[in-house]
Amino acid sequence: MARTTMSDLIAYVRVLIDDEGGTPVFTDDEIQAKLDANRTKVVQAKLIPHPINTPSGQSCIDFTYPAKMWEGGNATTLYDKSYNVIAEMTYEEDAYEGWWVFSTNQINNMPLYITGWVYDVFKVAVQLLEAWAAKLKLEYSFTTSGVQAGTHSSNLSQKVKQVLALADDLRQYMKVKTVPSYRTDLEP
């Protein structure tokens, strides 16, 4: 059974791959497994404040983090400058956009930190579309003919091409991963 905190991300992936309504190609558990395989753990990273000036001084209730597609609900934890957990009821989150809005001024609690998971939903969508295309390749095309119906054909290769074309379109939005390289043959 998929985690409830993943329901928005799973629904978003379904929209990306057009697997909504009717009989879905993938179960929620299958999509969640792909999401879990394509996530990055963020631990106590600083949120970016967006302060505003008011007649009574500076106020700050809006914060962002430069990553989108967080696992929602209680799967993300925010901390104040003393690393105390901030209660969920004091802020609203937009996990898609990486945006947190507080009901009170946080200027005295800054910096704020976040711990949670960030998902590469576009990479997941590409992987699922490629899996879908592989399933379609195992099916076959057919032609029927009859006096009343005339001749009709169903060509699954067209659907395979369209599914793979959608995967190619979404591939450009995947997150880029970098890997540091070190040379051990050079003196420090």
Image (cartoon, rainbow, N blue to C red):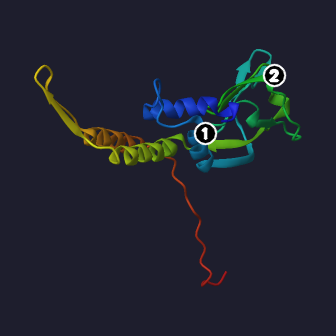
Compared to residue 11, the image places residue 182 above or below, namely: below
Q: Position of residue 147 (x, y in %)?
A: 10, 23
Q: Residue furthest front?
A: 147
- Identify the residue position indicated by label 1 in the image: 29
Camera-near label (1 vs 2) is 1
Identify the secondary structure beneath mark 1. helix
Would residue 67 be visible to someone looking at this image? no
Q: Nearer the viewer, residue 170 or 13?
A: 13
Q: Compared with residue 187, is residue 77 higher up or lower down, i.e. above or below?
A: above
Q: Is residue 171 above or below residue 72?
A: below
For the residue carrying disc 1, how many other residues have a C-alpha within 10 Å: few (<14), some (14-19), or many (20+)?
few
Please report the residue visible at 60 percent of the width from the left and 45 percent of the height from the top: 33
Quadrant (top left, top right, bottom left, bottom right) of the N terminus: top right
Q: Which residue, given by chain and number where applicable, does mark 2 sit on? A: 89
Q: Is residue 156 left or right of residue 130?
A: left
- Residue 93, label in figure: none
Q: Amino acid at mark 2?
A: Met
x and y percentages locating residue 88 in the rendered image: 80, 26
Looking at marks 1 and 2 on the same chain, the residue that comes earlier in the sequence is marked by 1
The picture quadrant where one finds residue 29 is top right
Cα distance between the residues tagged 1 and 2: 29 Å
Is 12 placed left or right of 163 in the picture? right
The quadrant holding residue 107 is top right
Q: Residue visible at 70% across and 23% down?
A: 52
Residue in view at x 45 percent, y 31 percent: 19
Callout 1 amino acid? Asp
Residue at (63, 30) in percent of width and height = 7
In this orientation, which residue lies closer to the viewer: 141 or 38? Answer: 141
Could you say which is closer to the camera, residue 81 or residue 179?
Answer: 179
Which quadrant of the figure contains the C terminus? bottom right
